[in-house]
Structures are given as C-alpha cells and as structure tokens.
Image: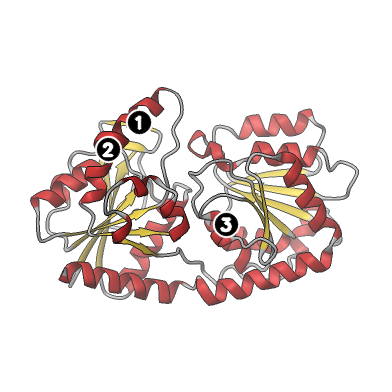
Amino acid sequence: MVKIAQVVCAYPPYRGGMGRVAYEYTERLRSRGYDVHVFTPRYRAVADDPKYVHRVPSPLYVGNAGVVPSLMRRLSGFDVVHLHYPFFGGAEPTIVGKALRKDQALVMTYHHDPVVQGIRSAIYGAHRRLLFPWLVGRADKILVSSRSYAESSDLRNVPGALDRVEVMPFGIELDRFHPGKEPELRAEFGWRDDVPVFLFVGGLDPAHHFKGLGVMIEALSGLGPYPWRCVVIGDGALRATYEANVRRIGLSERVAFLGNVSDADLARYYRMADVHCFPSTERAEAYGLVALEAAASGIPCIASDLPGVRGVVLNGETGLLVAPGDPQELRKAMLLLMEQVDLRTRLGESARRRAEAEYAWDPLVSKLEDIYRNVIRG
C-alpha cells in the first residue's frame, strides 16, 4: 500500500483554503485505499482527530508559521510527501528529510506567494533569497492552481522550477453546493425574496487580512438608497472591528455577521444569496475555493482581478472582475448585478456549468493519483 504524507501549516477545524485542500486530498485518497497521514503543527488541542491526523508540537510559531523540526524524523517511511506551501518552519525540515531519503518522492503544492507585513517582511526577503530556491529545487513535482499564477509568482525566479510545474486545480463538492432557493432561510431574517442578498465568506483573523471585507463594507456604504442585504460568514479577531465599521455607517440592519457556520448551513447560505463577493486585495489570494462554492451554487461572483483568481472567475462569463482594493469599482459591479437580474441569472448558470465540467473532485483526485505514481517511478 502506498503511504502518503500531507504536510500543511493548518488543518480543519481551522478555516482556511490550504487546510481544506489537504483535507479533501486526505479523505478522498483514503477512500481509494491509500494510507494517508496528515502532519500539521499543534497550535491548540483538537478533540476527536482521527488517528491519521498528527498535530506535531511546535516550540515556536507566529500566526500559521510553526517551527516543527521533528517532521524530519516523522516523515520517514512514506513513499510520497506532499508539502503544501507556504509553510515556514515546516517546509525546511521536510526538505531536509527529502535530502536524506533519496527514494522518497516530494510533491509541493504551491498555493501562493507569501504576503507578510512589518518586520516579518524583512525575514521573508532573506528567506526568499537564501532558502526558497533550495526548497523549490528539491521538489519532484510542483502543483499550481493555474499556470498564469505560477508564471507571475516567485517560482519564476528559481531556475528550472517552471519546468516541473503541473496545473492541478482544486475541486468542489457539486452535490453539497448546488443551485436552489432558501425561502425559509430568508424568512428567518425577515428579508423579502425580491431583495438582492450579497454574500461574503472568509476568515476574519489577521492571517486573512487580505480578504478585503473592509473594501466591501466601504462599497456597501454607497448603496444606501438601494434595497439590498448582506451576509458575512467567518470569524476571527478582526470581526469586532468590521462590525464597528458597519455600525458607524448605519448599516447594522442590513449586514448580518453570522460567524462560522456548519458545512450544511454554508451551502444553504450560498443558495439564499444572489451574488457572492470576493474582494481580496493581495496576491496571497491565488485561487478562491469560495468562488468555486458560489459557482457550484449557481450564483455569480464579483472578484478582484488577481492572478489565479481570474482563472476561477471569468469576467463577463461566470462573474465580474474588478480592480483589487477599489470600493468604487466594486460598488459599480454590485449595482449592475442588482439592477440586471437577467445578467445575474446568466452568469450564475454559466458558473454552475463550468464547475460541473472542470472542478468535480473525482477526476481531479484521479489526476493526483497519476502524479504520485509518476514521481514514485521517477
């Protein structure tokens, strides 16, 4: 039996795209008979983890960057190690282990360029110059969500890296996220069926500062004369600040902050909404699982025109793209989809068709199996 290790900086129940992808790979590969284990830092105790999820003690961590030197030892005996990058403090011992075990295959999913602020930016600059080429150079295969993002990322500065790149989109659960209506859910809020509802889904913690909720709130502040409502799903230390901003501009009755919701309820909120907003501001947003969830649910997405994101949301076909960090452009797009119901419907239907054609999980996991087989043989 092939043994596979998924190495990732954060894992459910923590909410985040990297951990969610690692979770999907783990569960779907295990259902196909592979012996898959997860290695992730132990930032806090988690109850009811399965035996194959290993939360490794981390003597030092900042945000989702956790130093886990014992990974070098723990990854012994695996045929394939699948590293989800960026993972500062975890990538380094993983690569050292690879150097010591010549027969072990290493696959790296390059999720995005790190975006760091303050003193950490200087540290990352040194890391990028000194360690990053060494890390990338030892990966047998580098998986990216889109070729366009890879070619504009830090990978382009590492000789030979793009030659080992393979496009591997992330998938979506088409049975859970599907088109429909949720009149009972709207009734719980006391909202009429003909009032457009905008939806934001994302982490509200400092690690996800780039999700752009502040930009969206500013855009909403200019839509006061029009009928609309907004649902914000997500939680974190920044939530109180966002809620205070909404109160300050007098929109508390229109914007509902729901915190984290169950997986089942999340799908219902997509169906309740008319438009999904994805206003991320920085390159750390390299794909957008939430945009796929909206597409599968049959609603259009207004997204920031960022590398990677523009491959998930097709402008004028499955949604609208706007300049990152520009509340005026975002407001114009929101107003357009409020007023043109036919356009909204057409974009949503097109988004669902594309999700069915390109983002079903089963064929994507089959492709991942082929990648593993090839790197093991190679």
Camera sees residue 254: yes
CB atoms of marks 1 and 2 within 8 Å: no
Q: Residue at x 31, y 38 (%)?
A: 88
Residue type at the position of mark 2: Gly
On screen, residue 196 versus residue 257, left or right, reads right
| Residue with the mark numbered 1 | 125
Q: What residue type is labelled 1?
A: Gly
Residue 157 bears which disc, if any? none
Q: Could one spot residue 175 in this view of the protein?
A: no
To which residue does mark 3 refer? 310
Q: Percent x, y for residue 377? A: 16, 71
Distance, label 3 to label 2, CA atoms, is: 31 Å
Relative to 281, is 301 above or below? below
- Identify the residue at horizontal 79%, vertical 66% (top origin): 343
Nearer to me, 263 or 148:
148
Q: Quadrant of residue 354?
A: bottom right
Q: Is mark 3 on a helix, strand or loop?
A: helix
